[in-house]
Structures are given as C-alpha cells and as structure tokens.
Image (cartoon, coloured by chain):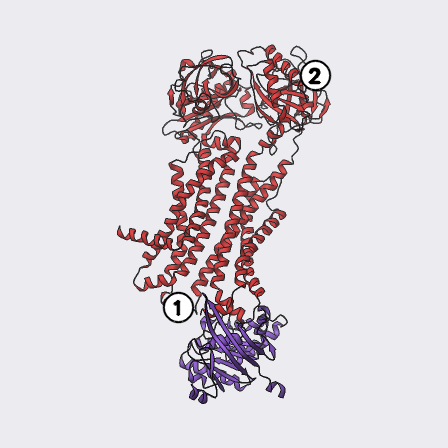
Amino acid sequence: MSGITQTVRYALRQLGRSPGFTVTAILTLALGIGANVAVFSVMNAVMLNPSGIPHPDRIVALRANYSVGVLNNISMSATDFGDAISEGTPLAAGAVMNSANYNYLAGDSSPVRLIGAQVSWHWFDVFQATPMMGRTFRPEEDLPNANHELVLSYRSWKNRFGADPNIVGRKLNLNEQSYEVIGVMGPEFGWPNQAELWVPLGLPSGAYTDPKNRYNEYLFAVGRLRDGATVQAVNVFLKRKAQVSVLAEGTASYGKASGWGMFSMPLNDFVSGNLSKPLSILLGAVLLILLIVCANIAGLQLARATARQREVAIQIALGASRARLIRHALVESLILAAAGVGLGLLLAKVAIPALMLLAPVNVGANIQVPMGMDVLLFAVAVGVLCAVLCGTAPAWHMTHVRWFQSLQESGRSETSSRSRQRLRSALVIAEIATAMLLLVGAGLLVRSLEQVERVETGLDSRGVMTALLSLPPDKYKSNESKEAFFSALETQLRAQPGVEDVAMSDSLPFVALGGSSSFIILGRPVAANDPGPHGNIRSISPGYFSTLRIPVLRGRVFTDGDRATTEQVAVIDDVLARQYWPNQDPVGQHIAFGLKTPPITIVGLVKHARDNSLEADGTEGYYLLPLAQQPVRDFSFAVRTSAANPESIADAMKAAARGVDPNQPMYDLKSMDERIDASLSGRKFLVVLLSLFAGLALLLAALGLYGVITYGVKLRMRELGIRLALGAQRSDVLRLVLGQGLRLAAAGLALGLASVIAANRILASLLFQVSWFNPLTLLATSLMLAVTVVFASYLPAQRASKVDPMETLRQE
Amino acid sequence: MAESARQPLIQIEDLTKVFYTDEIETHALSGIHLAITKGEYVAMSGPSGCGKSTLLSIIGLLDTPTSGRYQLNGHPVESLDFAERSRIRNQEIGFIFQSFNLIGDLTVYENVELPLTYRLKMSAADRKLRVMEALERVGMAHRVRHYPSQLSGGQQQRVAVARALGGQPSILLADEPTGNLDSRNGDAVMELLQKLHQEGATICMVTHDPRFAAHAQREVHLFDGKVVAEGRMQEVMQKV
C-alpha cells in the first residue's frame, strides 16, 4: 500500500514540476472525454435507454407491415393488438396508445393545447411506471364514455399547474369536457416523450377482437416480454396469429393479397430508428477526437521522457525495476486521465443542453439526458483507455533508455531522442489523417445539405404561414358543425389585412400528420393476389392549390360548389397518375373506397409536391378530396400573405380563430419555410456537430503538429546552430523546419485519403446526390489542412531561424 | 601574388568585445591587434576564459566585435548583417569544432556536402567533386555512407575537417580540435592539420595544450582578453 502511495505521490510531484504540461494535458483530455460523454449520454438516452423506461430491453414495439407496397413498419389495429396479447403470448403485458390533442381551458385565460396520449389501462404497467401522486387507470375507466380521468406528466404538473400538491382530484376542462386528475407521474417517466397527459383510450372491449377493424392501423402498441421470452418468440407468435387470421379470411383474403403481417422489435430500435446511424457516426467522430487527444498527450509525454532520460537512467542504475518505472509512467497517466474525467464530466454537463438544443425535434423534444451510473461507467472506461493510450508509449520508451549511455551523455548521440521524435511524428501523421477524415466527412455532408436544400418542393413556400387546430369531438360531432367552423374560420382569415389566400387540410405538406388508404378503381377488377391501389390521402379546401401554388396540370381543382351533398370528387397528383393510370388520362376516371361506397370522380391532375422530406420522397402518389366531403377534426391551414415576414400575421390568425370559437386555440404557428427547414434538422444536426468535431480535430492536430515541430526544433537546436555556423541563411533554416511540417502533412494527407477510401461506404450512406469521391471537397480539405500545417509550423520555424549559432555552439 | 602575400588575410585592429549581463560589463577582449597572412598556421592559447574562443568566433564571423576593425581578405567585415556574414562564413571560413559538430542524421557524405548546399550556384556534380576530394584528403572517402555514430571520435573529427575543407575556404578555424579525442587520435588530427598546412592551408587554431600549439608556426597567447605574447612557440613560452 505504501508503495502505491509513494508512486502516486511521486507522480503528483512529477506532474507538479511541469504545470504547463499538466494543465494542457488535463484540459485537452477533458475536452476529448467531455465530448465523448456528452454524445454518449444523448445516444444512451435516445437509443440505449430511452428516458424513464426501466429495463427498456424487455419492451417491444408491436408493428404491422405489408410486404406488397411500401408499408413495411406501421402502427397496429386494435384487432392486431388483441391477437398480440391473446392466449399463449410471450408478452407479460401489452398496451396501446393513440395521440390526442386537448384544448385546455383554465378559468378565463386563453385556451391552450395540451399534447396528450389516449392509452389502454395497462400502459403504465408495461413500462413498470408508478405515479408520483395518486394512481393510474383502472380497467373500468378504459371503456367508452367512462374515460374522463387523466394522469398528468411531471413536466405538465410543474409547468402548467405550478406543481400544485393538491392536483389529484381536481377537475380540468379539456375539450370542453370535465376530466378528473387521478395521478401525476414522476420526472423519470414520460412516454411518449412529448405527452403532457394521459387519458384512457376507452375502446369497447369488442374492438380488440372485431375482424372488421383488422386493417385500420392507428394504434401504437407496446408489450413487455415475459421472463425468458425473446423478441424472436414474440415474432413467431405474431406470425402464427397472422396466418390464422389470413386463413380465416378465406380465398379473397386482403391480408394474403397485400402480404400483411405483424412483428415486434425492441422499443429502443424503434425509438432510435434512423437516428442510430447519425448518432453512431457522431460517437465515432468523438472517439476519433479522443484518439487525437491521446496522441497529442502521448507526444508530450514522449518529450518529457526525453527530458527525464537522465533521471530514469539514474533510477535504473540504482536498481529500479522496469515494472516499477512502467508503473510510475502509467500512474502519471492515470492521474491525468482521472482529472480529465472529472473536468470532462463537468464539460459534458454544460455541453448536453447545447447538444439537445441543436438536436432535431424527434431527438431533443422532452428527452431527459441524465448522467447516471451507465454514463459514469462510460466516462471511467474512456478515462482508463486514455491513460493506457497516453501512457504506454512513453512508459515503454522510458524503460528502454540506454541508461549507461545516458549517464555518460556527451551530446554525441541523439538516437533515442530521434526515435521518440519519429514516434511523435507518426502520431501527428495519424492525427492529421484523422482530422482529414472528419473534415472530408463534414465537407461532404455540407455539400449534401446544399444539394438537399436545392430540391424542389413542388410548392411555393414564400410568404406562407401555417398553423394547426383541433376541434373537440364532443362539441363538433356532426360534419355540418365542423364544416361550419372551418368555413367561418376561412372567411375570418381572408378578412385579415395582407392575407391573399387561405388553404385548409387535414395535413399540409411538411406538417406530417396525414395518412394513407387503399382504394379501388371502378371498372378495373383486382387480381386475386393484388391488394389493390393504395395512396396517400388528404382532405383539402378549395384554396389549397392556389395558396401553395401547386401547378394544376389538367382538369379542375375544387370549388365552393363541391359540397357534401354534391358529386364526390377527387384530384390526384402526377405520381399517383403514373402509378395507376400510366399512358392514360385519369381525369374523368372513378375511384371508391369500396364497392359499397359512393364513387369518386377524378376531376383534376396536379403536380406532385413533397410532403415531409426533401431527401426521401415517398414512392406513393396522393389523392386529395374536398374537405367539405371528407371533414376532419384536426386540421392544419396555410395563409398566403403579402407581408414580407409571414410570421407577422400570427396574432391576426389566432384572433381569427378566437373570433369563430374562443375556446379553440390555434397552435404550432410556423412559416412554411420554417417547416421545410425543420425537416432538415436531422441532417443539419449531423452537419453542425460533425463540422464542429472536424474543426476540433483540426485544431488538436495543429496543436500536435506545433508541439512536434517545436520539440523537433528544440532537439535540433544544436544542428541548426551548426548549419547556421556553416553558412546557412535564416531562410534556409525556415524552409528546413517548414519542410518538416509539410512532409508530416503530406504523409497525414496520404493516410487521410486512404482512410476516406476505407470509410467510403459509411460516408456514401450519409450523402445526398454527392459522391464520396468529391475532388472539390478533397482539394478544399487538403488545402485547409495544408494552410493549418503551415501556420502550426511557422512559429517554431521562425524561432528556429532566429537561433544564434554562437550561443548554440557555446552551450556544448 | 606578391601583393597578396604582403596583404594579411586577417587584419584585426584595436578590437574589443564587451558582454553585458545584468548590468555587469565583461570585457572579453580588449584592444586586440592581430594579423594572419595567407598560408600561416597560428595557434591561439591561454588559460580558460582568456577570450581565445571569443576571438575565434569573431574571426569566424559567428560573433561581432563591440568596437575595432576587422578586415578579411582586405574587406571590412566587422559590421556586416547576418545574411552577409553567413555568406562569407560559408565561402571563406572552414570551421573545425572541439565536439566535431557533425549532424547525426546525415551521412558522412551529406555532412561534408552540407555547407556546399548553401551555395546557390554550385551544381550537384561540382559538390560531389569537392566532397570526394575533401574526404580523400582526410582519408575518409571509404566511409561516405556511414553515419557519425558509426565512426570513432578521430574519424568524426577527420570528417569535420573534410567538411571545413570542402568549401575551399581562405582559412581554417579550429577550436580545440583535439579536445574530445584521446592522445593517439589527437595526434592523428594534428598531423592532418600539419599536412594541410604544408599543402598551403591557412590555419588558426585555439588550443590550451602546448604540445599541440607547438605544431603552429606562430603562437598568440591571450590573458584577460589581451594578447600578452606573440611569436614563435619558444619565444612566447619565455615571455609567458
């Protein structure tokens, strides 16, 4: 024990003797470790352990899919869920959820919209979540017309209700109905993560077994695995259930024709979805930065090892074992790493909120990123890795001192210093290569972003303001009442100054609330194994195309004359036309939702407009129906204004809604440009962070190079003095030292290029209409690195050129 | 030829060198008068700290005098800038240092070639000719690919002599050239310098060893920064 104490004390004394080195090493380690901990924490919260869910690995998302078509991972129907939890299921518990918005009216204040989730009564049991106050739902509360209880989220309780300790039992006016607060969840549970409250779903018990509901998929279903059960076991069970269902449908089975099925996936995989790749890449980037940091510190340690060569030689001469010297070196590195971990955790604590601000809404919204035990363990593991990486090479070099020669140091031999310098140079080459890889990655992503931003949306977003509004079902039960509301609202909006046009829809482009539906084409029989046509469906007002300036290609658009009582009509886009009416004129054709529903005449053909992504457009087309014929409760609307800033009419829009019904709040007011921009937030998040990390890598590589060149100059001081004594000009020395930096840069660039080639598949998977081999990006990156290298080398080179040969030779 | 024989190669008049450190003036050299003619072999001796190395540095244009005049080949050089002094040093002066000062990363050939690479107008072929000629003169032509660490001290000093000779300088300045050598190698280096002198080289050597100073034609003895005796070895010894 005393030996360890002595070693630690000795190491602390050694570090104390080099305060400049110690502070630099701890700060750079903290930077590297902090970045890793921050990214890992976010990844941990989003992917590995979504906030507030104990044992998330035991929870599965239950999903449906259609192998024919594009629906390969969608919600479940109530009937699907009923099958999933039926007898013999490997699930211990299951529950379903449907998103719901509630207009909350508190006293005489303005109504606000609360994000809610209608859940079956088992919801909290699946997540093993218990309330902080009160209770959760009982089976008898999860029935039609009995569902007027609610559980508040911790955030909502705190922010909306001032953390009222007597909230349980209080009645709240939601959607102009009275709901009783029966419980408040603790801060550790919030799933789905934007929910401010939960209310019972209240489906009739028969809904879960009714085969008529089979293909009406709108419920998000989850299940908790029984002890010992696996996801595979659930999948086998669901597959068997699906086969039974298809068999029961007989020969004309829609399920069979469409390739319908059910499956499960770990909830974490479902949550992380397409985020797993960008987050993994960011974690990879920060790990590379950590390696650069370690290379820098190992380089500095090697320099110190040279300076301490004589001291080590004396220790060896006095009988110190190699193991003891290695222990000394590693303990020093461990102390540095421990300090780096401590400071890194503090940095991460500051960086995480900034990271979440930059994160796309689906990552950042309401996600808690706690720095729990798993994060601390990660930080410790990273610290140990750093200690090993930073300490091994110097320890090896220190213990392979030619100690007898060192004691007899005559200044003639610099072999060991030179070999250390070579190792340091190799480390710097690796740093430059890593920086190049990150810079090329960031450069390619920036170019991809530019390409994505150039994608045509198919609509004119300039001057368009949008908002959402939900009507309470109890107050607006009839189609007439809904139609009357939106008709009055449209009139009010059109009366606002500066408003040029108004559109309403169940889901505007880039609002992403819309759904899809199968239909039939009248007069075109469907083959036995063909599930029939399928497309995205929208309900729109007559002003939709003119407000969004979506070009009409043929026929007509809707008018005020298209009423619920008049001929059912539809407008389709050119994508749907190409899918189902290739080389034909779809205008005048008839479609329907089924053989027993009224026919719908296609009256117009419009150009396709992107719906929610500039990067990936769905392969399915759109069919649009008049809002008057397909009324909805939740709708979004767009207002085209002549104002330079469309957001300036936000207040007028809210006032217009209040003018129609003061209890219905308008929410999520954003310009269309902002919505389009938000659709790129995931890519921008990656671009910003990777650029940031690439810049950090460049800075660290430059620091490493500066250190190597400076130390190289120090080592070569005598040589430079000799050169100057022999008649070298100062410019010769400047060129010599700069040349050293440029040679390292050239080697780093070559290695960097090789690493870019090696990583081309990963890079290519992130790019949009940009090749991973992009000469312009490679050239710009190489130039940037070259300029940085010249800057990093210039100062030591200039100092070297100022060497006084007389002074240097006098020091012999 | 007769004109150049009369004209001293090195002409120093009333030269002083003062070092200023922490408000203390140290007079390293005071009122030095010295002339070295072409083909002469001069030894500068004196106790440690007497200023002989400082004088050699000024003669070698590594340092500048505080006052006084210094003419090299008839040209005043005491107030030249660094670049001009470097150029003259490269072309007119060959240095031989006590600790050889070879560059460890360069081969024997590259070490000898090094000063020639600073002459912009010299072709690689000319450099090679000069290098091989110099190495042959010191008997090291067979070790061109070796590194200094692979040579003995005596061999390293011979390479250093070849490096000094390669540029065909007007004068060879040797600062304690045997200081890091054993007596056998020391004698060998002195014999080499003797041979070069006989072949016409002008040599100015700093030494504190009377045995080696005896090789020179003339000895200049310094004490406390002043020339206290000058002449043939025996005369100087008597004066001292």
Give coordinates of residue B49: x percent, y percent: 43, 75
Q: Is residue A559 above or below residue A24?
A: above
Query: Dot 1, how many residues are within 10 Å of its Cα: few (below 14), some (14-19), or many (20+)?
Result: few
Q: Is residue A620 left or right of residue B110?
A: right
Query: Foreground: A791 or A479?
Result: A791
Where disc 1 sits, the SS reads: loop
Mark 1: amino acid: Glu
On residue B8, the disc is none
Shown in purple, the chain is B
**Residue at mark 2: chain:** A
Q: Residue at 66% of width from left, 10% of height from top?
A: A565
Give coordinates of residue A85: x percent, y percent: 42, 21
Give coordinates of residue B92: x percent, y percent: 58, 77
Shown in red, the chain is A
Residue for badge 1: A409
Q: Quadrant of the C terminus of chain B?
A: bottom left
Q: Is residue B91 above or below residue A20?
A: below
